[in-house]
Image: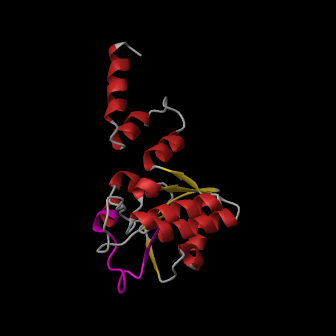
Amino acid sequence: MIDSFDGHIVDEWACRDERFVSGAQVGGVVVTTARDSMWGPTIPELVEALPGIEIIDRSSVNAYDDERVAKAIEATGRKKLIFAGISLEVCAAFPAMTAVARGLDAYVAVDASGTFSETKRQAGLLRMQQAGVILSDYATLTVEILKDNGRPEAGAVYAALDMPWATLVGQVAKAYGK
């Protein structure tokens, strides 16, 4: 699940990483909060990166409290959920903690989430850890989903993650005929 809006993003953790956003194309749920009033429109890059994906606009603080969001998450049939949001300590943390409370495995891609201060970021991370949420980064979560570097799409996945060392490893392996 990705939760984001435009206009109130203030630090380097801002969720403008289209590489992570593409994960929502594989059965993700995308939500925003009060886009037509309080928080402003959904980040345009997010909308462009997800053509045809419904973005659920809600008013509840915790996305999981919105019945449409809860049903959309349940409809995926997944027991392991990845969250990202602006702000990290609310929009990613609250639904992730709710998922854990419901017996699901919740992961938060910390580097794909934004917040408004270092204090909020640290407090949010501590709270999520205490609740049993698994904290990670988008690249590690993506590679974990890949599972096997022998899969045909592995090269494209690493290329999309913008990991130059992975490209170099691939070039070396190719040079040695592996």
Residue visible at 53% across and 44% down in the picture:
145
Quadrant where the image shows the C terminus:
top left
Examine the rendered structure and indicate whether residue 142 appears above or below residue 32.
above
Residue toward you, 159 or 12: 12
In the image, residue 34 lies in the stretch drawn in magenta? yes
Residue visible at 45% across and 58% down in the picture:
24
Q: Quadrant of residue 132?
A: bottom right
Q: Magenta span covers which residues?
A: 30-46
The image shows residue 113 at horizontal and vertical percentages of 42, 61
Examine the rendered structure and indicate whether residue 102 appears above or below residue 140.
below
Can see residue 74? no
Residue visible at 63% across and 68% down in the picture:
98
Residue visible at 50% across and 47% down in the picture:
141
Examine the rendered structure and indicate whether residue 61 appears above or below residue 73.
below
The image shows residue 56 at horizontal and vertical percentages of 46, 75
Query: Which residue, as the protein is rendered here, is positioned at the far right?
Result: 103
